[in-house]
Amino acid sequence: MKMDFIPNPDCHYMHDYAQIFTCIADGEFERNKTYKTLCLEDLWFIVYFVMGVKIANIPWWVDCCHEVQTGPKTDTIDLWAREHGKSTIITIGETIQDIIKDPEERIGIFSHTRPAAKAFLRSIMHILEGSDLLKTVFPDIFYKKPRTQAKKWSEDDGIIVKRKGFHKEATVEAWGLLEGMPVGKHFTKMPYDDVVTADHVNNPQTMQRLKDMIDLSMNLSVMNTGRRRFIGTHYNHEDPLVHLRNQKGLDGEFLYHTRIKPATDDGTPDGKPVLLSQEALDRLKAGDSYTFNCQQLLNPTPVGFTALDSAQLKEVEAKDVPGDLDMFMLVDPAGDNEDGKVKRRDSWAMLVVGARQDKKNLGQFDVYIVDAFISPSGEDEAVDQITRMYTRNGVIQKLGIEKAFMSMIESHVATALKKKGRNLTQESGSLVTLRHMNRNKAIRIRTAIRWPLHNGNIHISKAVPGIFRERLRSEMDKFPHWHDDGLDALSYLWDLLKDHRFMSPDSGEWVAKAEKAWQPQNQAVGY
């Protein structure tokens, strides 16, 4: 176990390793006893000398190991830029050190799915199988041939080192939050790493389920003494790590100690890289800006970067909404996912929008949102809400409803409105089935809304309830990484406008059409 080591003059090591190794070679220090002390006391020693992470001999790695080792032992959130060593140091390195300190530990590693957690367990297994240093210095803990000697040594069942106590949990196990959650386990420590991925961020239901499963998994910790660490990067405003980071106790204090380590020294795109080369950082910056801000700068809401800026949504008094608008109603049903199932937090979005041709910009429209509803609802309740909104908003030229999987919602709405004297049919064009036609939803929303929003063409009446005005603003500011129900509904307006014929309110044609639209309804409801 000869140690070859060249000190980095820029690093502030916990120990003088070169001097220690010289003393061992000269017989002044007993080899195994010295290595044992270093493993117990020095996390960086484990990362560099035991795990063999040779790139760790730089100030960043040395300082991060020291901060983790001397900082809080539980209820921590480590948000570090991607590829900056957080999993190597915390999930793998500290787990090995925990076992050395106490072989009775029962550590459960949790990721979004079990295969992801097994990847961390696999790394730990590989190190413990191949480290002659650990086997020699800690023969009372580690097996020489764990695959044949240990009671358990597999990714599925976990691994068990030499220990005195009887525990139903292995020394280290790997579990998933979205699938494969264990039952009846009680872990002394629970590192949560890789709990959310880019595939999850555009699915609010999955994001909520991850949060729920994290809360549920807390019951798997040993009461009072169980320790928890969360490790990762940001993916969006509503990911589980943001949720946990903002949690406060009854005393108003944050429940978790958060360490944030962006890829640059000041957390801005133009800052100096703390670990990567400038060339590598520039290459990442050249990619998607939102991904760079989330994954490298740990800022899902960078100043000046919003795909849709809610500040450009103009609020107007109800009395200032023009009277010469053609009115449209747009409905985005809940449950328009792949399987058509409505989750309990799915939201319906219903907007009544007025539009007129923009005289200054040929081919563009002035848009006014005059009524809105964005909230979870059952289908019967939603049909009632659509009916009420439609009947209270005067002459609506077209009601557009997005086709949601196998739903027949448009038929139910037409039936309900007929009872109110409103005869809507697809043949007449008054009822329109809206279809995404294989268009990517985020691209469709951005393409429809961004230009008119940024050019001051989209307005919202203050008569719209504040909760829904704020919901639309949040959807804009967090687009495309949050709920987009209201924006989805609004984006379909431009589909309806493509073939719509606008008429002057002063023309006899407009008056005749209005009278025709109102006459049956007025007779039916007794106006």
Image: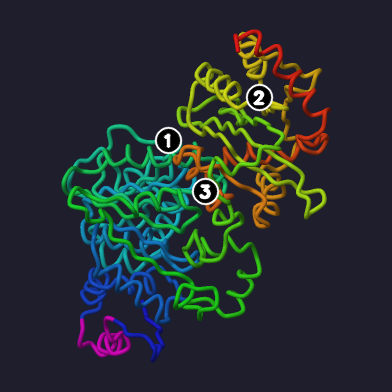
Nearest the viewer among 504 and 426 is 504
> Horizontal placement of 85 versus 280: left or right?
left
Mark 2 or 3: in front is: 3
Three-letter amino acid code of the residue under disc 2: Phe
The tag on residue 405 is 2
What's the residue at 22%, 58% (across, down)? 140
SS class, disc 2:
loop
What's the residue at 56%, 41% (across, down)? 319
> Horizontal placement of 241 versus 329: left or right?
left
Q: Name the residue under label 1.
A: 180
- N-term mark: 1 or 2: 1
Three-letter amino acid code of the residue under disc 3: Arg
Q: In which quarter of the image is residue 219?
A: top left
Q: Mark 3 points at which residue?
A: 473
Query: Distance of mark 1 from mark 2, alpha carbons?
Result: 29 Å
- State yes or no: residue 254 in magenta: no
Nearest the viewer among 139 and 508 is 508
- Quarter of the image with the C terminus is top right
Mark 2 touches mark 3? (CB < 8 Å): no
> Horizontal placement of 244 versus 482: left or right?
left
Q: Quadrant of residue 525?
A: top right
SS class, disc 3:
helix
Query: Distance of mark 2 from mark 3, alpha carbons?
Result: 28 Å
Region in magenta? 14-29
Is the residue 320 above or below the residue 73 in the image?
Answer: above
Three-letter amino acid code of the residue under disc 1: Gly
Mark 1 or 3: in front is: 3
The x, y position of residue 29, in whole percent, is: 21, 84
